[in-house]
Amino acid sequence: MPPIPTGVLLLNLGGPDSLDAVEPFLVNLFSDREIIQLPFGRLVQPLFARALSKARGPSVRRNYERIGGGSPQLPLTLAQADALESRLNRDGGAFRVRVGMRYWQPTIASALDDLAAEGVSRIVALPLYPQYSLATTGSSFNALAQALDASATPPRPEVTSIEAY
């Protein structure tokens, strides 16, 4: 019987993968109360996020247009995931490495679903941010906890989170 694989979940910010994705990405980003805390935030944050995304969207879209029409973050992070999985499994390991983006695709929830479908019962959550910050690592860990709580795929995996390295 093959060993039960351990999952490694690479957490990153994410970025729009196309020019059409810029405003929805910004809405996700500005909706996060870990980044912007408004008085009565739960009530006004969605409206604020949409208005700010609408205002900032054109200039941000122009910036992404200058670098090819989308963020390079996902292809680079997927390449890191592939390299890490290859290295971890080189000497007979049983690891599955997946990417979960905080504000875009693939989401943390979809990465958890993928790991569950592969039979993973233990996950190491590894943020790719250069330092701990509530607005980056903290927000991603909160999103991970919410995705685990909302998951319809039992049993809940054991999660080890690496906060800093």
Image: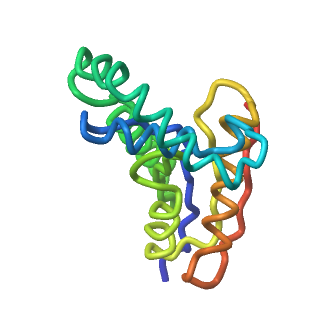
Identify which residue is drawn at 50% across, 46% down.
Answer: 28
The correct choice, above or below, for 65 with respect to 70 in the image is above
Q: Quadrant of residue 159?
A: bottom right
Q: Quadrant of the C terminus?
A: top right
In-image side of 115 versus 59 (left or right): right
Residue at image x 76%, y 49%?
40
Choose between 38 and 89: the one closer to the eye: 38
Depth check, front residue: 95 or 55: 55
Colour pattern of the rendering: rainbow
Residue 30, position as x, y percentages in the image: 56, 38
Check the image and report above or below for 159 versus 104.
Answer: below
Q: Position of residue 134 (x, y in %)?
A: 76, 36
**Relative side of 34 to 67, left or right:** right
| Image: 129 above or below 50 | above
Q: Is residue 122 left or right of residue 67?
A: right
Most foreground residue, 127 or 91: 127
Residue in the picture at 43% in, 46% down: 104
Q: Which residue appears at 47% of the width and 70% of the height? A: 113
Q: Residue 95: horizontal and vertical position, in percent?
A: 51, 58
Return the x and y of residue 33 as percentages of the image width and height: 69, 44
